[in-house]
Amino acid sequence: MAGKIILDVDSGSDDAVAIMTAVLSPDIDLTAVCTVAGNKSIENTTENTLRVLDAMHSNIPVYRGCASPVIKGLVNNRLPPSHRKEIMIDGKVIQMHDDLLDLPAASRKHEETPASVYYVETLRKAKQPITLVAVGPL
């Protein structure tokens, strides 16, 4: 029996691979995908998530999460250059992740329920375990 999973992502190219893997795995029952700001803004990570699921012909619901960290902000300028999300090469800024994935615009919208509310409601009612796989920032 496939395990129930909720993915929590900040979809850039790396999380797109996680989503595709989960959708295609016979061992995973992907219940929902929740988004969070991280690699890019919440608007872009949510759109990227929807684009990937559209490309996979999947109707798994997407719940939009936080637009910024709840407690402590990301401090990119304190990271060593090897861990920053963009670098300068020959005077040109190179980003680790483009703002939007090179896929057609999403054909649907995210769910109206915020991700935090979805988590509380879903996990309280769950009759069997659901694993939260957080690949975006917590």
Image: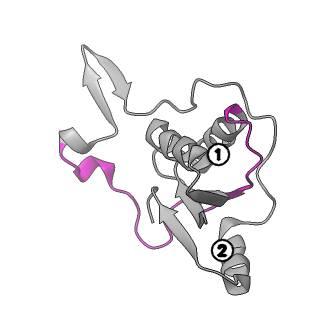
Which residue in the protein does label 2 denote?
Answer: 119
Tell me if residue 85 comes above or below residue 64 in the rendering: above
Which residue appears at 49% of the width and 40% of the height? Answer: 17
Q: Is the residue under label 2 in contact with that under label 1 (CB below 8 Å)?
A: no
Residue 35, quarter of picture = bottom right
Q: Is residue 67 visible?
A: no
Which numbered tag is attached to residue 15? Answer: none
Residue 76: say if magenta. yes
* Residue 72 drawn at (x, y percent): 40, 69
Tell me if residue 47 comes above or below residue 62 in the rendering: above
* Residue 133 drawn at (x, y percent): 49, 63
Tell me if residue 52 comes above or below residue 110 in the rendering: above
Residue 3 appears left or right of 56: left
Which residue appears at 79% of the width and 57% of the height? Answer: 111
Residue 94, quarter of picture = top left
Q: How crowded is mark 2: few (under 14 residues within 10 Å), some or many (20 or more)?
A: some
Q: In which quarter of the image is the N terminus?
A: bottom right
Which numbered tag is attached to residue 43? Answer: 1
What SS does tag 1 mark?
helix
Q: Looking at the image, which is closer to me, 78 or 120?
A: 120
Q: Nearer the viewer, mark 1 or mark 2?
A: 2
Indicate which disc, 1 or 2, sits on the residue closer to the N terminus. 1
What SS does tag 2 mark?
helix
Tell me if residue 116 comes above or below residue 45 in the rendering: below
Q: For the view shown, which residue lies furthest in the top direction?
A: 90
Residue range of the region highlighted in magenta in the rendering: 55-80
* Residue 85 drawn at (x, y percent): 34, 39
Secondary structure character of the magenta stretch overall:
loop
Q: What residue type is labelled 1?
A: Glu
Q: What residue type is labelled 2?
A: Tyr
Q: Distance between the residues labelled 1 and 2?
A: 20 Å
Q: Looking at the image, which is closer to me, 82 or 73?
A: 82
